[in-house]
Every structure is written in structure tokens, then in C-alpha cells.
Image (cartoon, rainbow, N blue to C red):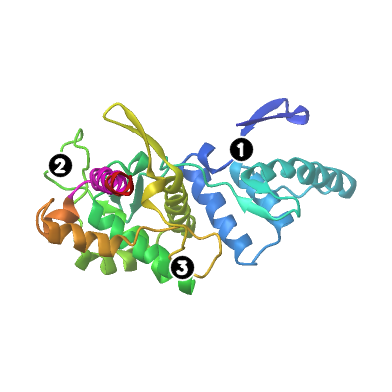
Amino acid sequence: MISLEIPDIKKKLYLPSDLSDCDAQQYANVSELIYKYQSGEITYDEFRVLALYRLLDMEPVINEDDEAQIEKMANIYIISHQIDSFFTFDEDGKKTLKQEYTNNPMQIVKLDKVHFHGPSNHFDNVQFGEYVDGLHFFTEYHETQDLHYLYLLMATFYREKDPKALDDDTDVRVEALTGRIEARAEKFKKLPFGQVYGFFLLFASFQKYLVTAKLYWQGKEISLAILFDQKTETTHQPEAIPGLGMKSILYTLAESGVFGVLKELRKESFWEIIFRMYDLVKRDADTKAKTKK
């Protein structure tokens, strides 16, 4: 958080330093502005000023005194440079949005009095099958820039609460059925766009995290980097996220019978499958190394 002192109103305000600092409303608001900036609807200077107002929950006030208004806007413009902390800048000044978070600030979204529950922090409650479906929509959006894929992506993960679920269940959402994704996607077109694009940004950040994640499993630190090659799954952006070819892996694991048939495999925990994949790849690498010796 960035602390801001406003002497005129004798008030201290706190400005998020990047997306990971935002609460649910701030996250949705600034995500919408990020989309507008990235799509060319607004300039970067406009983005900074609008983001400052949204993040601090301020409304523009027109002062009848032109001189006072000019001075006020000049101060706002200077303070808006703090929004630069949402990006990294290379030597040429090229901006890259910071996406280094896996916490989900929008775990529940409300639409027409219905609560839709999404992924928990670090996607701990996600099933492998829904992740595979979501990755497909994510890459399709990269390829086509068709907004419908953003709604399909969100509809894959956000579902109503299962009436049979208890509040302390790991996942309270109804079963992930692919046949209902399209219908939910249509409903979600009534959501504030910032929530929809915000989830896309979260998914992208989670993908980046997976590539270099170092986790502890059975008392040992493991790096998931060995699961990923350096080729991208999409040609739309050169910095797109490396992928695992998840759909083919899904079928391969189903054929092996390790986790049961395809339908059962889709219901398995995403992280359980990832750790199992790591174990298989590591064993294979160790076997090849021994063979060479």
C-alpha cells in the first residue's frame, strides 16, 4: 500500500501499489480501466487519473474558480504517477502489468441476487477438468480477442453454491458440468465488465506463477518448471504463458487409469494432478539420467 497525505482535507489515504493490494471493488474497477487502456480506448495518462479516482473512491468535483480547478487537477495529475507502481518498465519505457499474485479478491460475485462462487486463493478448490476447460477459453481469447471467451472463462469457474454443501467444505460450488458453461456465460454478460476482465487477469497471473512455482511437497522443495516447455500455446502475444498441453495430458492420464476414467479424472483436484505429473516427469528424468550413465 502507498500512503498519501492530503493536507487540504487533513486526511491520509491508502492507495494499492498493484493489483494484489486491491479489494474486490478496487480490483474490478481498475481491471476495467486496464482493459480500456490496453484496447486503446483511453491513453495512459487518462488511465492513471481515472484509476486514482476509482481506487481512492473519489468523485471529480468541478470548482467554479478556474485557477483553483487548474491547481487541483495539476495535483491530481502529479499524484496519479503513483499508479505507475502497477507496472514494470524496461529500459525503453515499455510497460508490463505486474501479475504476480494468486489470491482471488473476487471469490464471490453477485448477479440477480444469486451468489456465484469462484476459485479460492491459489486455485486450491479447482478441479483438473475445469482448469483444462478454462485454459482452452483463456488461450482462445488470446488468439481471437473475442470477448465471448472471457465470459466462458469466468463461467467455467464461477458457479452457484451446492445446496448440499456445508460452509466449511473445501469447495461449495455445484458440480462443474461443461453443458452449463454456455448458459452461465450468457448470464455473466450482465456482470460489471471489470469483474469479468479481472478474472482473466487473475487467471493469467496464475499461469505465470505456475511456470516458475516452487512448492513444498512431502517435505521437499519442488520446482514446477520441469513441467513446462518454452513454447507458447498462443501466437497472439510473444510473452504468452507457456502451457502443458493440458487436454492431451488429460486423455493420457485417463488412459493410464491412474485416476480412473476420464469423468473421474476431471473431478480430481488440480493440484493433486499437478503433483502427480511432477512425480512422473521427475522419475522419467531420473531414469533417463541413470540410463545414460
Identify which residue is drawn at 30% across, 49% down.
288
| Residue with the mark numbered 3 | 234
User: For the stretch drawn in magenta, what is the main secondary structure?
Assistant: helix
Q: Quarter of the image holding residue 166?
A: top left
Q: CA separation, marks 3 and 2?
A: 37 Å
Label 1 and label 3: CA atoms lie apart by 30 Å
Q: Which residue is mark 2?
A: 165
Q: Where residue 201 sits in the image (x, y, percent)?
A: 48, 53
Query: Residues in magenta?
Result: 268-286
154 shown above or below 59: below
From the viewer's perspective, tell me whether residue 60 is left or right of residue 257. Answer: right
Distance, label 1 to label 2, CA atoms, is 36 Å
Q: Amino acid at mark 3?
A: Thr
Q: Is residue 273 magenta?
A: yes
* Amino acid type at image mark 1: Ser
x and y percent of residue 153 in the render?
36, 61
Residue on which disc 1 sits: 17
| Picture quadrant where residue 272 is located | top left
Q: Considering only order in the chain, which callout, 2 or 3, is on the residue closer to the N terminus?
A: 2
Q: Is residue 111 visible?
A: yes
First-in-chain label (1 vs 2): 1
Q: Are marks 1 and 2 in contact (CB under 8 Å)?
A: no
Q: Residue at x 78, y 46 (%)?
A: 77
Is residue 260 left or right of 130 when viewed as pictured? left
**SS at circle 2:** loop
| Quadrant location of the C terminus in the rendered image | top left
Residue placed furthest toward the right: 67
Packing grade of label 1 (10 A; few <14, some 14-19, many >=20) is some
Label number found at residue 135: none
Residue drawn at (45%, 44%) of the image: 212
Q: Quadrant of residue 251?
A: bottom left
| Residue type highlighted by circle 2 | Ala
